[in-house]
Structures are given as C-alpha cells and as structure tokens.
C-alpha cells in the first residue's frame, strides 16, 4: 500500500535530506522494509533509488552507509536486477564498504553484516561471483569466518561463501578453498552457543554448494582435512535438541550430498563418527526434518542404486 500510494517518492526525498543523517537513515530503513518483491524493487529503481543510496557514501556516516548497503542488497530480488545493479558499479561500492568496516579499529558487527549480506544477495550467477571475487570480497569473508565470534557475522560470512558458488562453478570453489575458507567453516560449531545456531544452517547450505560446484579428490581432501565433515556432525548434534528445523534440514541435506558424491571414504567417516545415530535422533519430530534426515541416511548407507543425491538444493538466501 505504501508503494502504491507513491509514499516511496517522499521517502527518497527524505534520503536526500541535509537536515540530519538520522532522518536520512530512517528513510532508507523504511525503503528497505518496503522492498519485499521484484515489483517494488523495480519501481524503486525507476525512481533512481540506486544513485541516491550511492551518494550516501559521500556523507561519511558509517551507520547511514551501512543502511544504504543493506538496502541495495534488499533491492536485489532477482537475477535481472543483480545484473542491472552490477552495471551501475554497485559491486565495488559494496566490497569497499565491507573492507572499510573490516579494517575499522572499532568494528561494528552491523556494518560488517550489511556488506556480507549485500555480497550474498548480489552473487546471483557465476559471472557476478567472479566480479565480486575480483573486487576483493573473498579475503574479507574468509577473514571473518576465521576470526569472528559474532554469530551474525559468522552466519552471513558462511552464507556469502555458499552464495558465491553455483553448479559447475569449479573455479570459484577452488578460489575459496585456496583462501582457507574450509578452516573457517569447520570452526563454526566450536564458537557458537546453542542460542545462536543460524550460522550452522549456513554451514550446511555452503557445504551443499561445494558439493554441487565441483566434487574432486582435492576438494574432498581439503574439506576432510579441515574437519568440515566432523563439524557438520557436531553442528547437527549441537542443534539436535533446539527447535530450529530449518537448521536441521540444511545440515541433513549437506550430509546427504556428501554421502552421495563424496565417495566411500566420506561415507565411512560419517558412519564411524556416529552420523547415522545422530540423523536418526534428529529425525524424530518435524516431518520435513525427518524427510531430510532419512534422505541423508540413505545416501550414506545405501548402495549405488538406492543412494539419492539430495535433489533439493536451496538457491535462495
């Protein structure tokens, strides 16, 4: 209703306000809350919202810039919009903000998350993922995965890694692994409490993406040596007693794909680590969780005919 009554035009004018940064920030926040569909996103783009948000960088207020970056990520509702924004040089702006937030002596997790979120939203194709990597996002994401203890930063770092990969994006998978991303993913269950498990779902999501991007002996060896397989099981064990069904599903689907494409060595490792017992215990409850866990059990213990590849791969955020 707000969009259809053209109230967005008033909000965009408020974004340009020179009266106070607080007014501009609240206006940007309202716009990102309104942007819930491709139709609204397209309408906002036609009202020149992208240029307005980019101009916030000149003001120098990190809170306002972060909100603008977050809003740009929200505007990306489909592949066509991502391509359009990339042509407007949004990617250097996003990565520059992430770098500035990362290198700040007084880091603010909200500012970092805004950059990570926008990277994840913009990475809608292999071409855009490579553009983001060339702009320097990989080293920043991996830095946070390997050093941060903030659950939201870890969640969006892991999610961004997964979003950078698509089926058959072997080049990107290798770039990420060479940057030591596996080690960062493996540490997630050790630094998160049972009250902050969203990042564990992102761990599962990212392992799924690795499995689809390319599966080779080198990738398998790198993930195993970094402890990612053990971490998946540890994550599922940690989340087992918590009412976070989406996390359970993501982790079970990751195990399912590993069991299917990882070879006998991976399947043996999952079994020896008690993976089947964990999956069976988690399966007692929500029907969708049970479906994902049973799929994983079949992938790990079944023969070549009965194993399934966990065909449900989430391509969304």
Image (cartoon, rainbow, N blue to C red):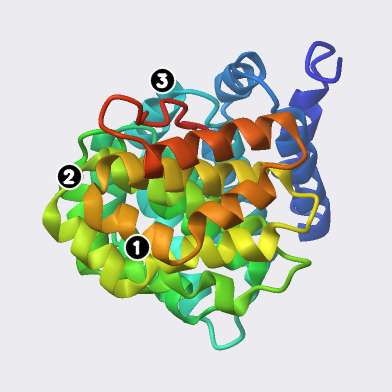
Say which residue label 3 marks.
Answer: 80
Question: With respect to residue 215, does 233 lie above or below?
Answer: below
SS class, disc 1: helix
Q: Secondary structure at mark 2?
A: helix
* Local SS, label 3: helix
CA distance separating discs 2 and 3: 23 Å
Which numbered disc flags the more N-terminal residue, 2 or 3?
Answer: 3
Residue 308 sits in which quadrant?
top left
Q: Position of residue 182 (x, y in %)?
A: 34, 67
Residue at x 29%, y 66% (from the top left corner): 224
Nearer the camera: disc 1 or disc 2 = 1
Q: Nearer the viewer, mark 1 or mark 3?
A: 1
- Residue 170 is labelled as 2
Please say whether residue 134 is visible from this viewpoint.
no
Q: Is residue 279 left or right of residue 305?
A: right
User: Real-space Cα distance between discs 1 and 3?
Assistant: 42 Å
Q: Which mark is residue 269?
A: 1
- The one nearer the camera, 144 or 89, is 144
Task: Work out whether mark 1 precedes mark 2 in sequence or the reverse, and give the earlier one.
Answer: 2
Give the mark toward the camera: 2 or 3: 2
What residue appears at the point 43 percent right and 39 percent down from the top-left corner?
122
User: Residue 73, how many percent across, how many down?
Assistant: 55, 41
Residue 226 visible in the displayed image: yes
Q: Position of residue 248 (x, y in %)?
A: 64, 47
At x 74%, y 68%, the residue is: 194
Q: Tell which of 27 and 302 is nearer to you.
A: 302
């Amino acid at each position: 209703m707000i969009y259809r009554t053209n109230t967005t035009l008033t909000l965009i004018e408020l974004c340009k306000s020179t009266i106070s940064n607080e007014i501009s920030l609240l206006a940007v926040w309202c716009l990102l809350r309104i942007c819930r569909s491709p139709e609204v996103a397209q309408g906002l783009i036609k009202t020149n919202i992208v240029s307005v948000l980019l101009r916030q960088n000149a003001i120098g207020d990190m809170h306002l810039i972060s909100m603008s970056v977050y809003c740009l990520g929200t505007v990306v509702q489909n592949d066509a919009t991502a391509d359009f924004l990339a042509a407007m040089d949004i990617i250097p702006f996003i990565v520059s903000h992430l770098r500035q937030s990362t290198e700040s002596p007084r880091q603010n997790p909200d500012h970092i998350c805004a950059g990570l979120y926008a990277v994840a939203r913009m990475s809608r194709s292999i071409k855009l993922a490579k553009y983001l990597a060339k702009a320097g996002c990989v080293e920043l994401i991996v830095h946070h995965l390997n050093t941060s203890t903030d659950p939201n930063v870890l969640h969006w770092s892991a999610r961004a890694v997964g979003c950078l990969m698509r089926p058959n994006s072997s080049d990107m998978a290798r770039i990420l692994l060479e940057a030591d991303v596996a080690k960062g993913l493996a540490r997630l269950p050790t630094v998160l409490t049972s009250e902050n498990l969203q990042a564990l779902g992102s761990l599962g999501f990212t392992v799924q993406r690795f499995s689809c991007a390319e599966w080779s002996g080198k990738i398998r060896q790198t993930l195993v040596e970094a402890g990612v397989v053990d971490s998946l099981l540890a994550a599922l064990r940690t989340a087992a007693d918590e009412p976070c069904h989406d996390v359970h599903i993501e982790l079970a689907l990751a195990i399912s794909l590993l069991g299917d494409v990882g070879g006998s060595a991976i399947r043996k490792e999952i079994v020896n680590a008690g993976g089947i017992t964990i999956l069976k215990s988690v399966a007692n409850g929500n029907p969708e969780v049970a479906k994902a866990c049973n799929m994983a059990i079949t992938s790990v213990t079944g023969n070549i005919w009965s194993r399934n590849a966990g065909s449900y791969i989430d391509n969304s955020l």
